[in-house]
Amino acid sequence: MANRAKKPISPRKRGSPKSSPPDLRIRGPGCARDPGTDSPMLPQPAVFLLDYPLAIGYIMLNGGFLPLNPLLPLFSLAELLMHPIYGLSLAALLALAAVPGRGAGLSAPVRVMTWNIRFDNPADGPDAWPLRREFVQSLLRYHRPEVIGIQEGLIHQVREIAAGLDGYAWCGGGRDDGREAGELCAVFYDSARFDPLENGTFWLSPTPERPSRGWDAELNRICTWARLRDRRTGARFCVFNTHLDHRGVAAREESARLLRERIGFLAGDDPALLIGDFNARPEEAPHAVLTAPQGSGPALCDAWVAPERGRHGPSATFSGFDATRGIVGHRIDWILVCSNVRVLRHAILTDFRDGARFPSDHLPVVADVVLP
């Protein structure tokens, strides 16, 4: 169910998380399963494979196996700890493994998607929502992003998407009343991986706490945000999903300025992601406002610019429905991240169905990110 917009909260300040002693439970080879969810259990800080009388010369560090030495003969655990060389190396690895939050996120990238799904407009004819709904659902099921921000979804579209996806929860409110009226910028998230902590919706206007239209915008515009906690790593982060006005030039620039301020206010010390349809090209003012080193709130980085493992797909995101025309628009849908969030990959997806029709007039944008 869509949530009501919430009043602003004080910025959250976090202290250092409490460190737990390394889990040295005896465990056999393979990945343990959580009997409640049939999902892999959280990687332990350090686990030795001690099913056998002698210890294997490997240590599992945050989910990956590191060889102490490929030619290391089998030692007992006591011999390893007493060894003048390997005992020191082992102690160092154990100390590294026990550092809370360090390296845990490295093995757990988060796949994030932003997608303008096009509102349900009966005038769209062969591309009307009832004829493409199943394709939208199947695309999401196949690519399985763990955080999804959709734009232009009416309440029945959001509910139908939710009904077609197993294992997701969502939050958001309509732009006309903060509940169900008007388009939503809904945030979906993998409910098996993330715990929801709080969420809200605000308006892109000088009066962000109530339904309103800002500056020279033609329509009410909103941002829905959510604070999530990763069950695998304990990392907290905020995701902000928005849709800037398609006509108001001043409104887009002022909305970008407001978004940056509100991200700083609401996210506090938690890393933040800003995703959405910005109705602007990267060389235009909204992008500059959000990414400039100076300004109120954190400077954001465009995930498209320099992903560590490369980009996939075209360089534009507005396509129209007709795939035979190629990608004729501009890159107006973005994923922006705080400077301490690593971007591994970035993709603009071009899935189309029989008859060469895209599932929306915008292409989905995906990034794999690693939280600090």
Image (spheres, rainbow, N blue to C red):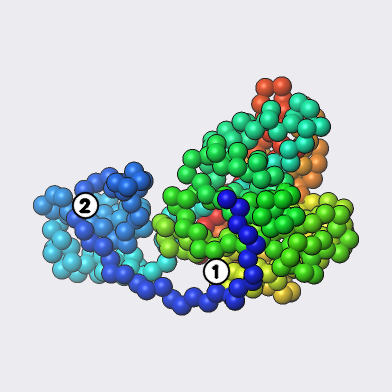
Report, in whole angstroms, how far the alpha carbon at label 2 lies from the one at label 1: 34 Å
Query: Vertical placement of 20 versus 193: above or below?
Result: below
Question: How many numbered discs sit on the rendered protein?
Answer: 2
Q: Residue at x 65, y 41 (%)?
A: 156
On the image, the x and y values in percent for residue 67 come to: 30, 54
The residue closer to the viewer here, 147 or 118, is 118
Residue 278, located in which quarter of the rendered image?
bottom right
Residue 140, located in which quarter of the rendered image?
top right
On the image, the x and y values in percent for residue 232 come to: 41, 56
Query: Vertical placement of 185 versus 253: above or below?
Result: above
- Dot 2: element: loop
The residue closer to the viewer here, 42 or 255, is 255
Discs 2/1, front: 1
The residue closer to the viewer here, 168 or 327, is 168
State the residue position of label 1.
270
The residue closer to the viewer here, 163 or 223, is 163
Q: Earlier in the sequence, mark 2 or mark 1?
A: 2
The three-letter amino acid code for the residue at tag 1 is Asp
On the picture, is 358 further left or further right than 84?
A: right
User: Would residue 275 be seen by someone viewing this image from the given angle?
Assistant: no
Label of residue 27 in the image: 2
The three-letter amino acid code for the residue at tag 2 is Arg
- Dot 1: element: loop
User: Would residue 9 be seen by someone viewing this image from the given angle?
Assistant: yes
Q: Badge 1 local density, few (<14 within 10 Å), some, or many (20+)?
A: many
On the picture, is 223 further left or further right than 320?
A: left
